[in-house]
Image: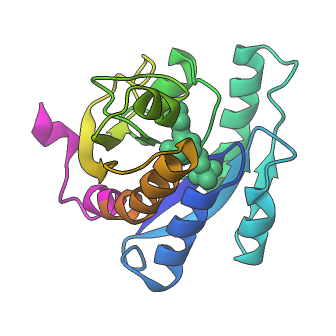
Amino acid sequence: KKRIAIFISGRGSNMEAILKQVKEGILKDVCEVALVFSNKPTAKGLAVAEKYGVPTAVIPSKGKNRADFEREVIELLKPYRVDYIVLAGFMRILSPLFVRAYKNRIINIHPADTNQFKGVGAYEWAFENKLAETKITVHFVDEGVDTGPIIAQRTVDLRGATTLEEVEKRGLKVEHQFYSEALKKVFSGEFNRQNQE
Ligand code: GAR
């Protein structure tokens, strides 16, 4: 079983979907959650993780320079011996220093096709451009922002969605199901980063 840390910054609905699948679903046999980490002390998801009995830790990123923050996180993670870091609404960019420490072992979910839209505000982008569909992307994190190798993508049908809330609602529903499915492929060895190159 792979040991994972889930990184959050806020609500943590993707984290909760993963915790459910680890507890009694498709991730049960392939991974265990060693830690939920937040860079924000106020992240709502922390209480949710505690409800699931998962250890939590916070190192505030605010007011700290990136290198100091990341060195602290690397130190924090050491005793947990995690195989993978799963970003779930983690809104702080990780520098090459951090990415190299966990090379090919950081996975992110991005609520758009990373080839089309990178960075924050992906649902706003889809809504404002009146897209008939958008794509959710699960990808490895490399040293760029939303540029890493794609593990899998899934389409969200946006036809008839007339508000941003509706776009987000449809997107999140897909994210919650799809992230665990993509993670399972990686943790079970079905998707191998090396095989893609
Ligand atoms: C999700 O839609 C996730 O894809 C997105 O933030 C939301 C977090 O929600 N991530 C990004 O935009 C990363 N750049 P959650 O905290 O409820 O999982």
Q: Which residues are magenta?
A: 182-197
Determine whether 136 is above or below 101 in the image.
below
**Residue lying farthest bottom?**
24
Q: How many marks?
A: 0
Q: Residue at x 70, y 42 (%)?
A: 9
Query: Is 66 in the magenta?
Result: no
Camera-nearest residue between 125 and 119: 125
- Residue 129, image x and y in percent? 38, 26
Q: Residue at x 33, y 60 (%)?
A: 187
- Residue 16, image x and y in percent? 60, 66
Is residue 16 in view?
yes
- Residue 179, image x and y in percent? 39, 57
- Residue 66, image x and y in percent? 71, 16
Determine whether 76 is above or below 81 in the image.
above
Q: Residue at x 87, y 44 (%)?
A: 41
Q: Where does ligand 1 appear, by image quarter?
A: top right
